[in-house]
Amino acid sequence: MANPNEPYVEKTVIEQPATVRHEVGPAPRSSGGWWIAALVAIVAVAAMFFMMNGRTATESDVMAARESGRSEAIIDNAAAQAQAAAANASQASANAASSMADATRSAADSASSAAERTAEASRNAAASATDAATDAGDTAAPN
């Protein structure tokens, strides 16, 4: 605390903004990027050279490739036809088995009907024979 007997003195402090200094000088010279770019360009030129001077296809190579493609297409077509034929044969076999089962069932039904008719005819014949024997016995007995 200030002493009340001392005279009043007012102090004013003025602050000025601080200045920042930037020193700009020439950029350091580095040629590493240029060396890398030159190396990439040389590799690209060499690759183009090898690609352009590669072996070109001769007429016999083209003919061999054409024949190979043709034979592969023929084999693929034959395989597809064989699969279709196998599917058709399987369907025909299933149809034949179904027809045979129907025919067997029909034959069994016909045989059963024929057996019933034969049994009925046998019963009728036995009844007729019995009647004939009875009639013959009646005519022979009155004597």
Image (cartoon, rainbow, N blue to C red):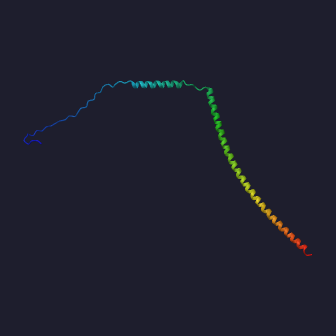
Give 140 or 125, whichever is nearer the viewer: 140
Drawn side of residue 31 relative to residue 105, left or right: left
Q: Residue furthest right?
A: 143
Q: Residue at x 65, y 34 (%)?
A: 71
Residue 119 image-quadrant placement: bottom right
Residue 29 position within the rendered picture, expressed as x and y whole percent measured from the top left: 35, 24
Residue 79 image-quadrant placement: top right
Residue 107 position within the rendered picture, expressed as x and y whole percent measured from the top left: 75, 56
In this view, 59 is above or below 131:
above
In this view, 142 is above or below 25:
below
Q: Residue at x 72, y 55 (%)?
A: 102
Q: Residue at x 50, y 25 (%)?
A: 48
Residue 92 position within the rendered picture, expressed as x and y whole percent measured from the top left: 70, 48
Q: Residue furthest left?
A: 5
In this view, 130 is above or below 112:
below
Drawn side of residue 45 relative to residue 122, left or right: left
Quadrant location, the N terminus: top left
Give 93 or 33, whichever is nearer the viewer: 93
Quadrant location, the C terminus: bottom right
Q: Residue at x 79, y 64 (%)?
A: 120
In this view, 129 is above or below 30:
below
Give 139 or 57, whichever is nearer the viewer: 139
Residue 100 position within the rendered picture, expressed as x and y whole percent measured from the top left: 72, 52
